[in-house]
Amino acid sequence: MSASVFDKATTEFIEWLQNNGVKISPKVKIEDLRSQNQGRGLVATEDIEEEETLFTLPENTLLSIRNNSLLSQKPHLREKLEALTSWESLIVILLYEVYAISDSKWKQYFEVLPIRDSANYKSDQLMFWSEEELALLKPSLIVERIGRESAEDMYNKLFPGLVVEELGINELKDVTLEQYHSVASLIMSYSFDVFDVLKNPENEQNSDASDSDENDDEDDEDRELIKAMVPLADTLNADTKLHNASLTPSGSDLRMVAIKNIKKGGQIYNTYSDHPNSEILRRYGYIESDGSKYDFGEVPLRIIKNHFTQKMGLSSDSFDRVTTVLKKIAEEGGAEDHQNIVLDSYDCFKDYEVIIELTFIIQVLSLLSSINQKYLLHQMNEDELYSTIFLVYKKCYKLIESGKLTNSFISNYRQILESRMEEYTSDVINTASDKVNSSRHSMSRIVLRSEYISLKNCLEVGKVFNNEFGKFKFIAEEKATQDIIKKRFSDSDGSSKKISKKH
């Protein structure tokens, strides 16, 4: 699209906003940021102070279940449309606005979105990557979460049966899978979850940003969130580290408010929640070149299994039986000290934090491996194994709660993370963040580097297990296992039981 056509669409969009009651601060303007691979963006034309309102959107500009052409023209469908999920209803509504009518109220808005402006906005969400391109992201586990199958299941649910035959929206009888994907990806990238003002107007009377946090919390409990397209608010680009403005309710309106001081010429950024680079790419089709603030790497359960079966003497069958028992303990417990620690994968964050389940399961398996050296787990029957694992589980809970881990835990933890890191190739490790471009090959390398750096940071055990949030003391394995062995493997006279003892 030429600059003149691009600018014309922008100008008509701004006129549409003004004609629909949107109040825009003279301190901001929409700029052409295509040279930065960012399409349109909002930029400060003057210095902006924290808490200044950048623009105000009246409820009538939002496109949602409460405000759309479909229900304006077919009000009898309201109950059935509201019975759908928030995702499904907005997909149907947006398809109707874009493909079924030529005079949509939001026509000028659509012209600055990817669904109309495909020349300047490329859909790079992982949904649209080929199998060859997705292979560039291995070994990231994000390739297992694309959701293409579930998206197509939703399409088959809606079309033609529910939308055409049950709802009777014949205007959508020819909607293709490609059109459905384009609308669904648009909602994924651009929609907001906003409070349902029209359904609960009494809850919005005191929702201005100046209200106390306590009152906001009380109001929020009664408010219902709906998914909506929010013009202009979605023009802001997003960055987890540069986030400087947020959308907030104000009576029946929405306000974009500066949450930091913004210098003249600075871009105004929103945020798409606490997502790592991999999830930003999956959902929104872009990456942050120097990594997301919330990046993490993942350790799959298979890596943990390989370590304890190949290096610590557990048989594959014993490992599987152990994880089955651990799941059973969590299911039967129902208390805080009976949490499920058997996950498909475990997060290791760039800021030197690992989820507690990773610490817990490695510590449990470390003690069980130590016990297995003398009392073979694979020779135990189900009751004996359950009893042993339950005692180890309780012991590990108490250890972690009291700020203690065993020396073998650290060794196993290090080797597990190193094994995972070995799956990342040297070209990924050496990728320079300042050389990123918009190609899918480049984006995949940055995602993998973000994960690798997160895993590497979590190898610094001094920062992970000795920080402001807690300091762990490391003890000898024997101190942790002696009580378990005494309770589980000794008779009342103190002699060792012969059952399942290794010779």
Image (cartoon, helix red, strand yellow):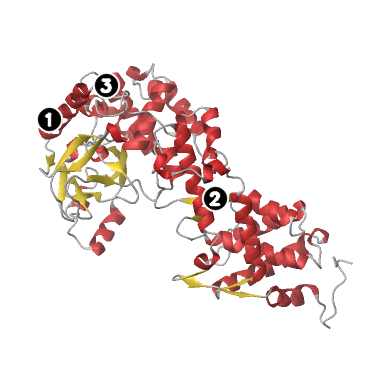
Give, as a three-letter code, the residue at label 3: Met
Residue 382: horizontal and vertical position, in percent? 77, 59
144 relative to 163, above or below: below
Q: Are marks 1 and 2 in contact (CB under 8 Å)?
A: no
Is residue 139 rendered to the left or right of residue 290? right
Mark nearer the N terminus (1 vs 2) = 1
Q: Nearer the viewer, mark 3 or mark 2?
A: 3
Residue 165: horizontal and vertical position, in percent? 40, 21
- From mark 3 to mark 2, how far is it between C-alphas? 40 Å
Residue 123: horizontal and vertical position, in percent? 39, 29
Give, as a three-letter code, the residue at label 2: Glu
Identify the residue at horizontal 20%, vertical 35% (top origin).
31
- From mark 3 to mark 1, how far is it between C-alphas? 20 Å
Q: Secondary structure at mark 2?
A: strand
Residue 74 vs residue 276, the one in the foreground: 276
- The residue tagged 2 is 298
Identify the residue at horizontal 40%, vertical 49% (top origin).
292
Is residue 396 rendered to the left or right of residue 78? right
Residue 1 is labelled as 3
Residue 408 vs residue 492, the one in the foreground: 408
Tell me the quarter of the picture where residue 111 sits. top left
Is residue 213 rendered to the left or right of residue 459? left
Question: For mark 2, does the 10 Å Cα neighbourhood hold few (<14), some (14 to 19), or many (20 or more) residues?
Answer: many
Tell how many labels: 3
Residue 218 vs residue 354, the one in the foreground: 354
Residue 85: horizontal and vertical position, in percent? 39, 37
